[in-house]
Image (cartoon, grey):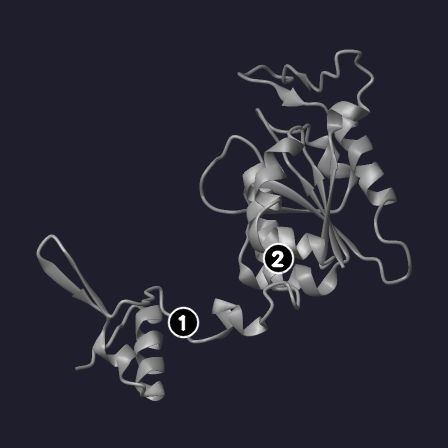
């Protein structure tokens, strides 16, 4: 079982996504587990404050190092015990390495525990990543309000690579000939005076031609038949 450890100020943000569909089933069937660590629970401040003004000036607030260090240490202590335990610490950042399916496969295969560090505001005190061997990961060339959404995206992609999570490993679109366009019943329908039909090749029963069509659509070089 792969365990995800989430360091976040907003653990409730994950509740809806983790409670639905394939991810919820994966948790129920113990293919994955998810644990949360709120840095506010590891601060000495009586108000559970974890942010301060940045050194050197500038707008916004920076998250303090010590509450995050303590949260990470707590996650490390709760990792799977035993010789086979292997942990990866992922620092979610817009300036990090581009996350992709290849990296997801690597994570799913190599690690028993993955710790996600979710930042907010102007970021986390950089001394945190100096203390640990972290891999900075980005989900795309854009900036989000925090690391929670990226953590959900990465966790979803990794979970899909675990055997039995999807039920049928052939459901992995990246492992089969797939088109970005899919069709189902009915064969045709009318909308605003026009009839919209399923491509004839998909009704032909000719598997070679269908695979050729799908491969062409996936590469952006679709070939149409009939």
Q: Secondary structure at mark 1?
A: loop
Residue 24 % position (x, y): 63, 51
Q: Is residue 217 above or below residue 86?
A: below
- State how far apart marks 2 and 1 are (Cα): 20 Å
Neighbourhood count class around disc 2 (C-alpha, 10 Å): few under 14, some 14–19, many 20 upward: many
Residue drawn at x 58%, y 72% is 169
Residue 111, how many percent across, how many down?
74, 59
Q: Is residue 130 visible?
A: yes
From the viewer's side, name the closer residue of 179 and 85.
Answer: 179
User: Which residue is disc 2 drawn over?
Assistant: 158
Within-10-Å neighbours for mark 1: few <14, some 14–19, many 20+: some
182 sits to left or right of 149: left
How far across and how far down the image is residue 186, in percent? 27, 67
Q: Residue furthest top?
A: 46
Front residue (pair 5, 140): 5
Q: Is residue 199 above or below residue 18?
A: below
Number of on-image labels? 2
Determine whether, in the image, residue 17 is placed left or right of residue 201: right
Answer with mark 2 or mark 1, whichever residue precedes in sequence. 2
Q: Which residue is mark 1?
A: 178
Q: Is residue 8 above or below residue 77?
A: above
Point 11% across, 52% down: residue: 192
Q: Which mark is residue 83?
A: none
């Amino acid at each position: 079982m792969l365990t995800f450890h989430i360091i976040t100020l907003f653990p409730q943000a994950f509740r809806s996504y983790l409670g639905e569909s394939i991810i919820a089933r994966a948790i129920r069937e113990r293919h994955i587990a998810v644990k949360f660590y709120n840095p506010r629970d590891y601060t000495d401040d009586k108000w559970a404050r974890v942010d301060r003004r940045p050194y050197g000036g500038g707008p916004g607030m920076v998250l303090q190092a010590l509450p995050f260090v303590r949260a990470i240490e707590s996650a490390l202590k709760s990792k799977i015990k035993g010789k086979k335990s292997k942990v990866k610490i992922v620092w979610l950042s817009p300036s990090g390495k581009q996350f992709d399916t290849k990296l997801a496969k690597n994570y799913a295969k190599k690690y028993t525990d993955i710790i996600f560090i979710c930042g907010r505001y102007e970021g986390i005190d950089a001394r945190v990543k100096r203390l640990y061997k972290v891999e900075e990961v980005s989900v795309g060339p854009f900036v989000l309000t925090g690391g929670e959404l990226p953590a959900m995206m990465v966790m979803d992609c990794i979970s899909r690579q675990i055997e039995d999570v999807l039920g049928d490993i052939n459901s992995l679109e990246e492992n089969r000939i797939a088109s970005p366009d899919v069709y189902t019943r009915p064969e045709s329908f009318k909308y605003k005076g026009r009839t919209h039909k399923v491509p004839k090749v998909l009704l032909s029963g000719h598997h070679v031609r269908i695979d050729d069509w799908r491969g062409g659509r996936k590469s952006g070089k679709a070939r149409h038949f009939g």
